[in-house]
Image (cartoon, coloured by chain):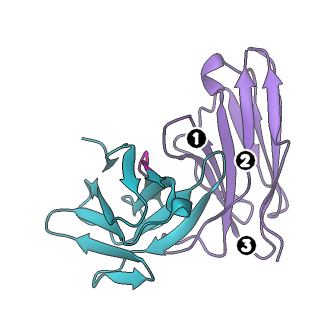
Amino acid sequence: RKEVEQDPGPFNVPEGATVAFNCTYSNSASQSFFWYRQDCRKEPKLLMSVYSSGNEDGRFTAQLNRASQYISLLIRDSKLSDSATYLCVVNGDSNYQLIWGAGTKLIIKP
Amino acid sequence: EAGVAQSPRYKIIEKRQSVAFWCNPISGHATLYWYQQILGQGPKLLIQFQNNGVVDDSQLPKDRFSAERLKGVDSTLKIQPAKLEDSAVYLCASSYGRGTRETQYFGPGTRLLVL
């Protein structure tokens, strides 16, 4: 089992729809969780950190499920500009090591 | 505020040649990372520096890859000799601290093609 697993997609979603994707992780002791966004041929950029209580930033909601060891990202009222690859990042065994998922590609269609 | 700078942006070399990449992190950032990202995959950490010391280089292929950050600021990553499978984007990132809760800021990357 990979340390961090994501559905590669692509998710093809019409503009205005709600889309959600999950990321599973193998280390039950992980404490730090993030979603990064990577546009085509660009560098990754932090979208949001994921807190134990869940957190929301505008149209984006991130949740953590420790029991089942996954984090989720929900995008409401999707925009064309949301088209990107979403990378899940989880800390590894040490307190400075981060493990990156392969990313989920999202395509928003007009 | 200036972001992470990398050069060159693109490089094409033949296998068995050498290549070097340069990175200048955000001013004041103590931690610097080099990642390799192969098409369709997530970034893979090659090496992490805290100031001028190595924190983690467990995934660096040390027989051909080397990196240094001599003065604790900018850094170079070298591949010698290059193999076809080294074709990838090499991303440099920096963060203020080294803990896993730190936001990493990435440079635009260097796209390497090995023929």
* Subunit under mark 2: B
Q: Residue furthest front?
A: A110
Rendered view: A109 above or below A48: above
Same chain check for tags 3 and 2 = yes
For disc 3, the marked residue is B29
* Quadrant assignment for the C terminus of chain B: top right
Which numbered marker is on residue B49? Answer: none
The structure residue drawn at horizontal position 42% and vertical position 77%, both measured from the top left corner, is: A59
User: Amino acid type of disc 2?
Assistant: Gly
State the mark number for residue B109.
2
Mark toward the start of the polypeptide (3 vs 2): 3
Of the chain colours in the picture, the one used for chain A is cyan
Helix, strand or loop under label 1: strand
Q: Residue at x 37, y 72 (%)?
A: A76
Q: Secondary structure at mark 2?
A: loop
Dot 3: chain letter: B
Q: CA distance from mark 3 to mark 1?
A: 22 Å
Q: Residues within 10 Å of mark 2 (few under 14, many from 20)?
A: many
Q: Residues within 10 Å of mark 1 (few under 14, many from 20)?
A: many
Q: Given contact means CB atoms under 8 Å apart, are the residues at marks 2 and 1 in contact?
A: yes
Reply above or below: B24 against B64: below
